[in-house]
Image (cartoon, rainbow, N blue to C red):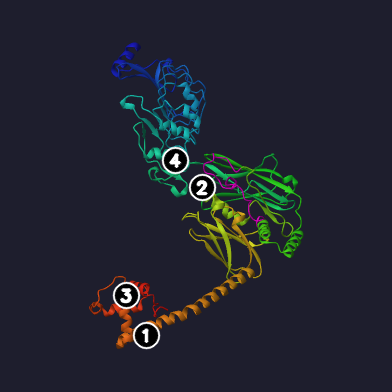
Amino acid sequence: MFLVLLLGLYVATGELVSPVSSCPSQCSCFYHNLSDGSKARSVICNDPDISLVPVGFPVDTSKLRIEKTAIQRIPSEAFNYLSSLEFLWMSFNTLSALNPDSFRGLFNLEELRLDGNALTAFPWESVMDMPSLRLLDLHNNQLTSLPAEATAYIKNLTYLDLSSNNLQTLPAEVLSTWLAVKPVQGPESSKMILGLHDNPWVCDCRLYDLVQFQKSPTLSVAFIDTRLRCSAPESVSGVLFSDAELRRCQLPRIHTAVARVRSAVGNNVLLRCGTIGVPIPDLTWRKADGRALNGSVQQETSKEGITWSILSVPAVSYRDSGKYICKATNYAGNAEAVISLVVSNSPKPEGNQTSNDKKAKVKKPNQMGKAAYQEKLVARYVVPTSNPSSLPALDPDLPPGLGPDPGLASYSLADRATPGPVTSSNPDALLDLEKTNLSNLAANTSSLQQDPDRVVRSVKVVGDTDNTISLNWRAPKAKNTTAFSVLYAVFGERDMRKINVGAGQNRVTIEGLVPRTKYIACVCVRGLIPKKEQCVIFSTDEAASATGTQKLINVIVITVACIIAVPLTVIVCCGALKRRIQKYWGKKSKDIQDSYVTFETLSPGTKAKGLEGEYLNRLNPEESNRLLSARSSLDSEATAKIEGQPNEYFC
């Protein structure tokens, strides 16, 4: 009787319910029709009281659905005996953990749906146990990242849904895989389907390729929802990918103004390091020998995107000598630069140098010796002249991560002031030069950096008053966009003040100087360190007196010129005025007429006798006046040559 009832149920429904002994409890097992007319076994387990994965599924199960249960984890090799399983749906459970071998043995599995769970991570290496997998649905979970290692396992997927998770970015390796997708299936499934919407994307340089990829649809990849939005940073929160403008990531480039710093024991030393990159790199310091740093670090970012890190080492001792490594790091990579700190004994006191200066003044050296002495004084403030390669500028063509060679340039400050001065790898005025140097790097001013010592020439000081001077220079090789900087300070002081000069200018006025004080001033291309040839030492009272003397000489020369030129001008004007008056009143004496006849008829060509009167009648009276009043007349010149008599009107 039981067999008859079972057969009747099969005829009525077209499905054969498996015996109770072959189907796990709390599950339903049945056959379903396939498109080719054959039948396959399906199993559904949706009892909310199920907390563990059931065992004992029929080995011929083709489709297994475990949904809306309390299962939290899938044990290892839970389905390894289901070699015929093609579809595994475990949606809307409470899954929070998976083992790397949870899906081992599922060689024929084509679809794996784990949506609606609480997964924070997925064992991507488990995809290797499912070589036939084409669809992976992980949407509506709590995934926080897609590791770069997943690239090797998702190449064969044609459907990947990662929407409604906590993804903030994607690795470049995964993006490259999707960009290189080529359709290999039939027309009905030729595109790879991606679900990336409803994630809190951080729109920075790491998503540059994804944003560009989403803006340019391809024939090989399609998005489930194209309305991808940025969640951070705040400036682009809520902005669609199609409207976002992102920059590509760039490796950090690191820069130090000098490679070696010398200091006396007990001084405070500042080591500076600057970097640029996208995004803004983070800077860290460490010693090459692994010892702990003796100092504090301050960091700031300028509006140009340049990050500066200042390592302050107080009261240096011999233990602080060594190499300090500054490291810049961002998403794209890292770069390092080395600064060597040399701590030595205190230099000779300033008093000895002062006495030597006085002796030099007493000896009254010649011009060549004086120039050499001035050059020696200037050398205290500027980097020694060297080839262009020694410039502390960052070459944009260098491979990322290469800083300046430690042997190229060095800069040291002696102890000239009160005890305990601050010795810096670069004075505060040169800090602005460093910043401008990196800005010029972004603007590609490498042409100036290749030959900087030939740009500024002939720096001269012109004194105006005891409080102001004018600085002139020549820059024959400067371009129309070349800007300059003027650095000046009281001679002997450390801090130099800076004046920015616009492009095309070669003169600047420095105000607010102290009378009877010696100064040093340097002119250089903005962003570069001045050379000795570009600096000049002057005293305000000497410059002013020299300029005053020059002005007095100019006044005397102009006055003498006026005294000589004015009488001659008056004589010429009086003669012209006299002729005008005579012409106006018609006073023409016979002598004047005779002289006119002689003057005009004695032309280079001879005239027939008796024709003089006819020739005179043809002359224009205005022409005669012109001949008398203009020495440059051709006729008068010819007459003078033939007659041999001088022109009486010539002054």
Q: Are marks 3 and 2 in contact (CB under 8 Å)?
A: no
| Residue furthest front in the image | 609
Q: Secondary structure at mark 4?
A: helix
Task: Return the x and y of residue 14 as percentages of the image width and height.
Answer: 30, 17
Whether residue 301 is visible here, answered yes or no, is no
Q: In the visual, does 583 lie left or right of 353?
A: left
Look at the image and tell me in which quarter the C terminus lies.
Answer: bottom left
In this view, the mark in front (1 or 4)? 1
Q: In the visual, does 467 lie left or right of 118?
A: right
First in sequence: mark 1 vs mark 4: 4
Task: Return the x and y of residue 570 as percentages of the image width and height.
Answer: 43, 82
Disc 1 target residue: 578
Disc 4 target residue: 208
Whether residue 390 is visible here, answered yes or no, is yes
How far apart marks 3 and 4 lie (CA) works out to 96 Å
First in sequence: mark 3 vs mark 4: 4
- Amino acid, disc 3: Leu
Q: Nearer the viewer, residue 399 or 143?
A: 399
Q: Secondary structure at mark 2?
A: helix
